[in-house]
Amino acid sequence: MVTSRWTAAPAQTASPRRRGAVLERAILDAALEQLSTVGWNGLTMEGVAAGAQTGKAAVYRRWPSKEDLVADALEAGLPRFEEVPDLGSVREDLLALCRRARDAMFSRPGFALRAVIHECDPAQAERFHGVIFDGVVEPTLKLLREVITRGIGRGEVRSDAANGYVFDAIPAMMMYRSKMCGSEWNDQDLEGMIDQLMLPLLRPHGA
């Protein structure tokens, strides 16, 4: 039997073109990556498009400005703090919250968020105020409020400690030490802050 010396080439399957939510997710991820590596000032729409392996037009069709893109990237990427730890004492609950906050600060979205906070001018920063407040500040304060209120109910915390100054103490300290002192907040640092700052601040009068 005579066989042909020509054989059919294997069929080439084209890689599926990304569309819709899949493409948008890739663009948002690329924006977070740019923010966390080159910062706000270094981020460009061209760089984001290259990182997402798409065309610049696909980015501009969805987000007409760098500010719009970054706001959506932060909103999509920021971790959600919803569950309140209940480990039996206000010390352990606060430590658990602080570890979560530390891990979020040094995640890719955390680096991206700090690039925006530290590098944007006041007019640009105003564009992200709602994203930062609704996605970071308010959820953090809500969890702190619940932990401290529960500590009051257990008699571990003084009754007048559930106020804004107390709730601000941990986030303010972590941001200040991170930005001004380069602290990475290892577990020993977190325990020191809780034991030397927060517990004396929260302790019932006369205890």
Image (cartoon, grey):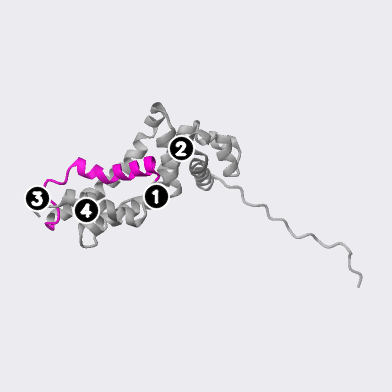
Q: Which mark sits nearer the N-terminus, 4 or 2?
A: 2
Residue to which mark 1 is pinned: 184
Q: CA distance from mark 2 to mark 3?
A: 46 Å
Q: Nearer the viewer, residue 118 or 29?
A: 118
Residue to which mark 2 is pinned: 70
Q: Is residue 178 above or below residue 87?
A: above
Identify the disc placed on residue 147: 4
Q: Nearer the viewer, residue 147 or 23?
A: 147
Q: Which mark sits nearer the N-terminus, 4 or 3?
A: 4
For numbered disc 3, what is the local secondary structure?
Answer: loop
User: In the image, which is nearer the foreground, mark 1 or mark 4?
Assistant: 1
Q: Is residue 69 magenta?
A: no
For the point 52% across and 48% down, the residue is 22
For numbered disc 2, what is the local secondary structure?
Answer: helix
Considering every residue shown, the one lying at the far top of the view is: 123
Mark 3: few, some, or many residues within 10 Å (few <14, many ≥20)? few
User: In the image, which is nearer the foreground, mark 2 or mark 3?
Assistant: 3
For numbered disc 4, what is the local secondary structure?
Answer: helix
Q: Position of residue 53 (x, y in %)?
A: 60, 44
Q: Position of residue 115 (x, y in %)?
A: 44, 38
Q: CA distance from mark 1 to mark 2?
A: 25 Å
Range shown magenta: 154-182
Q: Position of residue 4 (x, y in %)?
A: 89, 65
Q: Is residue 83 visible?
A: no
Q: Amino acid at mark 1?
A: Glu
Quadrant (top left/top right/bottom left/bottom right) for the N terminus: bottom right
